[in-house]
Amino acid sequence: MKTIHLGVFEVAGPQVGGTLSWPHPRSRSAQFHDLDHWVHIAQVLDRAGFDFLFFADGYGYPSVAGDLPETAARGGINFPSLDPAVLIPALARETERLGFVVTSSTGLDHPVQTARRFASLDHFTRGRVGWNIVTGASQNTVAELFGHTTMQAHDARYDQADEYLDLALRLWQTSWDDDAVRADAAAGVYADRSGLHRVEFAGEHFRSSGYFTVDPSPQRVPVLFQAGTSGRGREYAARNAECVFVQGTTVAHTAANVADIRAQAAQQGRDPASVRIMVGLTVTVRPTHDEAARLRAEFEEMQTDETVATLYAGNTGIDLLALDPERSLEQLLDRDDRGPVGQMGQSNIDRFLPKDGSAAPTVRQILDDLKGKGTRGFQVWGDPVEVADELEHLMDAVDLDGFLIEPIFDPADLEDVAELLVPELRRRGRMPQEPVAASTLRERLIGADGYFRRPEPAAASAHREP
């Protein structure tokens, strides 16, 4: 029986998942500017034995017809947002065990900048940090913000991301010997020069020559997360990721994605069981079923077609309200000028274009399906026993390692999970009776000794001085 790992999916913005919830009296998520708000959430999770707090992030925002829609601004739909990485040292100081995962794109900063930032965070958290690797989000708006003349194609972004990580790993893994740091005040020696090695990297997208200035952190390499479930995204995850975050649509579809990631990992020479795969889960748990159902109904009543369309356009480039509601997304394939369609959130397009011969849903059905769900994964509500039953079913049916809880009413939903659901999972032996006292996030999630190593890529070479 697998242990259930628990993380929490957050954004440094008004609400999670592109749905509308911040105006509800149960929610305090509009306080996202307040550091005390995040300290409270982190401490709730730390005491309850959650494994990590995960921050989605990006520079983009919803765009319809090339501009920020009024619906996004009025409703706080994936807009505005702060940089969550700056929160992490403060939250680590106020917690004992909780890990922190933050999203960073491979399409903007140079790998040297990213390697330095995460190595620094790993020091400041004493080894409790992870990197959620993304190739971008809302790429059309990001391209405009950064002055790029064109948006890079979907699969080409993953080609670049392969090389990006290759260089970051080279810097983390080969620049410093394990015993290079002496910090010997009596001898006046901080670092042993013979243990420092110059990195030479010449790839198609990135070049680097020199020494990495951050000495080895507790993990050396942050725990590597990846969240793409497109075909190319699953290939990238199978090669690189230690933890994969997928969004659940149906049990069968999600199980197929999970099986494919594990099979591709095996083809890469990895133990497929060592890849931790977690699915997004929106949980409304209350002492009774009726209380949970009432809260869920109140949330659903807040959602509108405009909210759904704003979110979907920001993720995929498709304005659902501009399409024929009685036809499927296949109507887009008839267009000569498809713009950004197919080059942005591919997985949220593929889910509505089935390849198993079944009928594709109409735009009207897509709007109804996404209403109250947004970019969220599975939806579960009920009393603690009902919710725990469903989590166990999903774990076994999909071959999961755990869940990322996506709160509706923040932080109240997380407090309910900590107080009502976690004790039930412990009673069933699905979570440890006491929070795990692992020293690093990698040890907590994977139990591996040392830091992540991957076979040297053939595309570039490192020069290590004798």
Image (spheres, grey):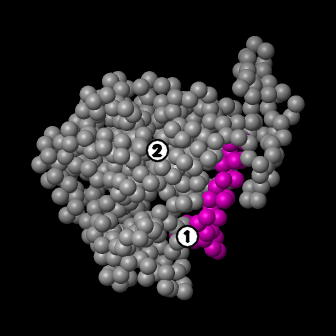
Q: Can residue 167 be seen in this view?
A: yes
Location of residue 62 by image quarter: bottom left
Q: Is mark 2 on a helix, strand or loop?
A: strand
Q: How far apart are marks 1 and 2 (CA)?
A: 25 Å
Q: Which of marks 1 and 2 is nearer the N terminus?
A: 2
Q: Range of the magenta residues?
A: 141-170
**Image disc number at residue 343:** 1
Q: Where is residue 304 in the image (x, y as percent from the top left)?
A: 26, 70
At 37% across and 70% down in the image, what residue appears?
Answer: 358
Quadrant location of the C terminus?
A: top right
Q: Position of residue 27 (x, y in %)?
A: 25, 51
At 74% across and 47% down in the image, what residue appears?
Answer: 457
Magenta run includes residue 160? yes
At 79% across and 32% down in the image, what residue appears?
Answer: 196
Q: Magenta stretch: dominant SS?
A: helix
Amino acid, disc 1: Gln
Q: Is mark 1 on a helix, strand or loop?
A: loop
Location of residue 324 by image quarter: bottom left
At 53% across and 37% down in the image, what residue appears?
Answer: 274
Amino acid, disc 2: Ile
- Taking the image as shown, residue 177 lies to the left or right of residue 360, namely right
Q: Mark 2 points at which residue?
A: 277
Location of residue 232 by image quarter: bottom right
Q: Residue furthest front?
A: 357
**Image disc number at residue 170:** none
Q: Which residue lies furthest to the top in this view?
A: 186
- Taking the image as shown, residue 97 lies to the left or right of residue 325, namely right
- Residues under numbered marks 1 and 2 in contact, where contact means CB atoms less than 8 Å apart: no
Count residues near mark 2 (Cα–Cα under 10 Å), then give few for <14, some for 14-19, many for 20+: many
